[in-house]
Amino acid sequence: MSINVDPGRLQRPTGMTYLAMRSRQGNRDVYTVRVKLGELRDILPIPHPERPQPGNRRISVPHAKGFGRYIRTRKNWTAPSLLVRDPGVCTFTPLSDGDGNEFSDAGYLTIPYTRREIPFWETSDGEAPPPATPPSKQLFTIDGQHRIFGAAYELDRIEAEIAACEARLNSSREGTQKHRELSGRLEELNEHFYRLHNESIGLDIYAEPDTSRGMQMFVDVADNARGITAAIRAELDMSKIVNRTLAKVTEHPLLDGLVDPEQDRMKDGSDMLIGAKHVTDITRALLVGVAGRISVAREAELDDHEVVKLTHSFLDLLVDAFGDLKSVRDRTMLPQKLRDNSLLGSVGMLRVLAGTYYRLTEDGADHHSISAFFAQLNSHMAAPVAENSIWRTDSKVKESFEYGASAPVMRTQNLGYIVDALVAWYANRPAQLTA
C-alpha cells in the first residue's frame, strides 16, 4: 500500500500547508508539524509586551530578545516545541493511497496567514496597534511566547541590518577597503538570515474552540512544568566557563565527592558540602567578584585550564588557612558538623572569601599574604555568630550577619558589604585580628 503526497498542496495562497501527524491528548485532536523560523511570523501572532493574549501572561522582552541572540550566535541551538491552540481556523485533510483510502493520523494541515501588525520595535512610541488579524481568526499561544518573539525580533533585526548595510555598500566606492569590509559584512548577515529563516522548530497545535478551556490549558502547562534547577544547569550548560570547568574544579580534594549535582540548597542533614551551583558561584567570584557578571567578551578571553588552576589554588589557600576546612578535606569532619559550628559551612561565606581574594589580588596582594590574612580570620569563624563577634562590630557587616546566624545574609549587596570590610581589614587590621 502506498501513500500519495502531493507537493503542490504544501503551499496555498490562503495559508501555509504542512504535512502533519494527528493524535489525541486530553480528549482533543493535536496536530504536530515542523515550521521554519521564518514562517512563524506568517502564521502566529507576535506577542506584544503591553497587550498579552487573553489567558496568557505578559512577556519579558529582555528574556525574549535573549532567545533571539541565542539562536543567532549558537549554531547548535536547541529548543522545545511550541504549543498553540486552534480555535477552529486550521483545516486538516487526511492523506490517502492510490485507491482513495484515507489515513486518519497523517495529512495536510493548512494554517491561515496572520496579517502582521507593526511590531512594537518598529513603532515610534512602542504603543500597541490594533491586531491586524482579529483574535478569533488567530492561533493562540499556550507555551513558547518568548521563543516566538525572539525568533521574529532577531529575523527582523537582521533584515534591518542587511538593508542598512546594502545602503552603505551602494554609496561606497568599489575597490576601496570600506567597500570590501561592507561586502564581507553583508555576506555574513545574509548567512545569518538564511540559516535562521530556514531552520525549524516543532509546533503542536491543539484543536480547542472553547476559550475558557483554552485558558485552563495555559494554567495546566504552567502548573505541571518543572523548571531546571540552577545546580543541574551548572552541570549541563557548557556555554559558560564556570560550568565548563565545574567537573575539573570539583576534583579538588576538598570538593571531591562532596558536591551535590542537583540541589541548590544544602539541608542541615545533607552529607554534601555544597551544591554544583555554589561551586560555579565561587569560581565566578574569583573571576569578577561577588557581584560581577562575566561578559561575552570576557568569556572569550578566559582559558578553561587557567580558571581551574585559579580555583584550585584558592581552595588550597582555604585549606591552609582554615583548620575546619582541612578537616573536611581529610574527611575527619563531616559537612553537617561544619555547618553546625562554622561560618565556613555556608556558601555565602565561601563566596565572600572568593570575592575578597579577587579584590585583594586585583590590588596587587600576593597569594602568601592573603593566606596569612585568612588564617587570622580562622578564630572568628565560629557559628552561630555571637553578639560580640567581629562580624557585629562594623555597621555594614553587622547588617549582613544576624545575631545567632550560622551564615551571612545571602543578598549580593550584603555579601559585598562583607567583602568591602575584609578588604579594609587587610589594609588596616583591627585589634581583634592582630591580638
Image (cartoon, helix red, strand yellow):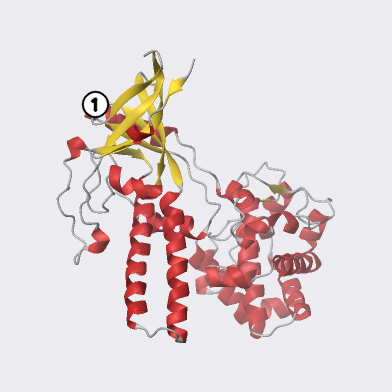
Q: Foreground residue, 414 or 14?
A: 14
Q: Vertical placement of 399 versus 50: above or below?
A: below
When asked about the image quadrant of residue 27, the answer is top left
- Residue placed at 72% from the left, 66% from the top? 311
Residue 126 position in % (x across, y down): 21, 62
Residue 390 seen in render: no
Residue 351 position in % (x across, y down): 62, 64
Quarter occupied by the C terminus: bottom right
Left or right for 75, reference 149? right
When asked about the image quadrant of residue 170, the answer is bottom left
The number of numbered badges drawn on the structure is 1
Residue 213 position in % (x across, y down): 27, 26
Name which residue type carries label 1.
Pro
Residue 263 seen in render: yes
Q: Foreground residue, 105 or 54?
A: 105
Among all residues in the image, which is located at the extreme front? 98
The residue pinned by badge 1 equals 209
Left or right for 322, reference 103? right
- Residue placed at 64% from the left, 44% from the top? 268
Left or right for 291, reference 312? left
Q: Foreground residue, 149 or 244?
A: 149
- Residue placed at 41% from the left, 27% from the top? 5
